Amino acid sequence: MAALGKEGHYEAQKMAEYLIQKGIPQQDIIIDDFGNTTWLTAVNFKKLVPNSKSVVVVSQFSHITRCKLAFKKAGIENVSAVSPNYFEWRDFYSLFREFFGFYKYLFWY
């Protein structure tokens, strides 16, 4: 879900590779390399699949709550989510950042 990462590859492409390795069929994965924010990814998804009633969002665990909020605000009725089962030191910072990001999405969009 986000554009070009600092590592030099598109994050959504790497996430899709991970899902395919875990047995998710490629045709069930929608990649958005143009969503520079979570909000834009949610809006892009709704444009690509306008009749979709549900989605499973894949992101880091600290980002799941804001992802679900963005997709619900974009018009997706049923939003569930999954994240990798590991913790990194930068997740402390991410949790702090996500607190403010969530409330921005809650009141701004």
Image (cartoon, helix red, strand yellow):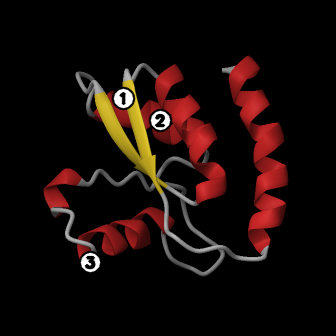
* Marks 2,1: beta carbons within 8 A: yes
> What residue is pinned by disc 1?
46
Q: Percent from the top left, x then y, of residue 82?
A: 44, 54
Q: CA distance from mark 3 to mark 1?
A: 26 Å
Element class at badge 2: helix
Residue 90 versus residue 104: which sits nearer the camera?
90
Numbered label attached to residue 79: none
> What residue is pinned by disc 3?
21
- For image coordinates 30% across by 31% down, the residue present is 54
The quadrant holding residue 80 is: top left
Q: Percent from the top left, x then y, of residue 40?
A: 54, 37
Element class at badge 1: helix
The amino acid sitting under disc 2 is: Ala
| Quadrant that contains the C terminus | top right
* Marks 3,1: beta carbons within 8 A: no
> Of callouts 3 and 1, which one flags the residue occurring earlier in the amino acid sequence?
3
The quadrant holding residue 49 is: top left
- For this view, does 94 lie left or right of residue 37? right
The amino acid sitting under disc 3 is: Gln
The amino acid sitting under disc 1 is: Lys
Residue 39 versus residue 59: which sits nearer the camera?
59
Q: Percent from the top left, x then y, of residue 35?
A: 51, 47
Q: Which label lies toward us, 3 or 1? A: 3
Q: CA distance from mark 2 to mark 3?
A: 24 Å
- For image coordinates 24% across by 71% down, the residue present is 20
> What residue is pinned by disc 2?
42
The quadrant holding residue 65 is: top right
